[in-house]
Image (spheres, grey):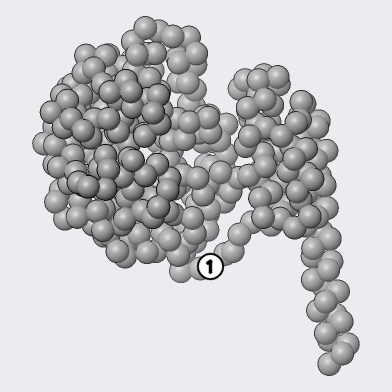
Amino acid sequence: MIGDIRIWPPLVLAPMAGATNHAFRLLARECGDVGLVVCEMISSYGLYYNNERTLDMFDWTDAERPVSVQIFGAVPEIVAEAARKAEDAGVDMIDINMGCWVPKVVRTGACAALLKDLKQARAVIEACVNATSLPVTVKTRKGWDLREACAVDVARIAEDAGVKAITIHGRAASQGFNGQSDSSVIAEVKQAVSIPVIGNGDIRTVDDVERMFRETGCDGVMLGRSALGNPFIFREVWAWLDRGERTGPPTAQERARAALRHTVLQVEALGEERGIREMRGLLPHYIKGLENAARIRHALTQVRTVADVQKLLSQVAELDCEHNLAERAAVNSGERAA
């Protein structure tokens, strides 16, 4: 439970800039078992000043619920106003980003920069909580750098301020995505607070989810980059959590169908020109790792229309058929030899 909202399965789609818009959040719902989806992070300044492009990111539908919107900022009054606008727009909960390490964002004093100024972090959190009746959560990291972990301190500040759940990524902000995520800090936070703790970082497979729950005792797990091109990861994880089953990865045909569905949803929301342009960086994820697909991956970065995408993805399905035929041939050959 996050406030009065039930999150089940205890699996969360992470906010990812340029990825977790309406199209991908809905696709994750359709392809897998996800308890909560989170919008890509939104600037509190953009909301405060009614920036049209920023307001367009309020793009959720009832089919995605429960859905959280993640905001970032360093000025308490601005963050508070952004929270009020998010509530008025009908979101289910609000998440404060205190983990993004990208330099141009950190230079504004927001996100992971707040880990260097916990007094300011407290002010931002309290302002957000006091501005809305919705559950407020925080997503943060181990600390600013490896010299001093402050995740426990942040979690206690958040709990005292009325935050209803906290997500901890096991890397320091200075690491970016480098190095290894430290699950021990997530376990420390779980021991220090009574609000739900969601574990994040280096979660790519069912085994990684099992390890996160076992090593940290966390209440839920957030998956991010592992879901790009593979929204089925939630289906795989839930099959193991719920029934102890190992379902295996999706087939190439399933990947191709999901990629086309993602494209169609994107185009419906943004129009063909912009929708396809934004899909160019996302489509190659769907066929990553498939044999003999390098040419198709490259071609997907240059598509211009839905028809272009459909034509290329039909070739991915053919690769899957060829693979299955080759497997059957190998089995039949082995049987004849025996």
Residue at position x 79%, y 55% from top? 292
Q: Residue at x 53, y 30 (%)?
A: 18
In the rendered image, the residue lying farthest to the top is: 49
Image vertical order of residue 308 relative to residue 81, above or below: below
Q: Is residue 91 left or right of residue 249?
A: left
Quadrant in which the C terminus appears = bottom right
Q: Is residue 217 above or below residue 33?
A: below
In the rendered view, would you say 245 is above or below 292? below
Foreground pick, 38 / 5: 38
Horizontal and vertical percent for residue 43? 38, 20
Is 335 drawn above or below residue 15 in the view shown? Answer: below
Q: Quadrant of the N terminus?
A: top left
Q: Residue at x 62, y 37 (%)?
A: 282
Question: Is 302 placed left or right of 140 in the picture?
Answer: right
Quarter assignment of residue 116:
top left
x then y, percent, for residue 78: 26, 14
Q: Which residue is mark 1?
A: 246
Callout 1 secondary element: loop
Splitting the image into 4 quarters, where does residue 280 fall?
top right
Position of 174 compared to 294: left or right?
A: left
Is residue 127 at least partly visible in the picture? Answer: yes
Amino acid tagged 1: Arg
- Mark 1 Cα-neighbour bin, 10 Å: few <14, some 14–19, many ≥20: few
Q: Position of residue 26 (x, y in %)?
A: 54, 36
Q: Residue furthest front?
A: 147
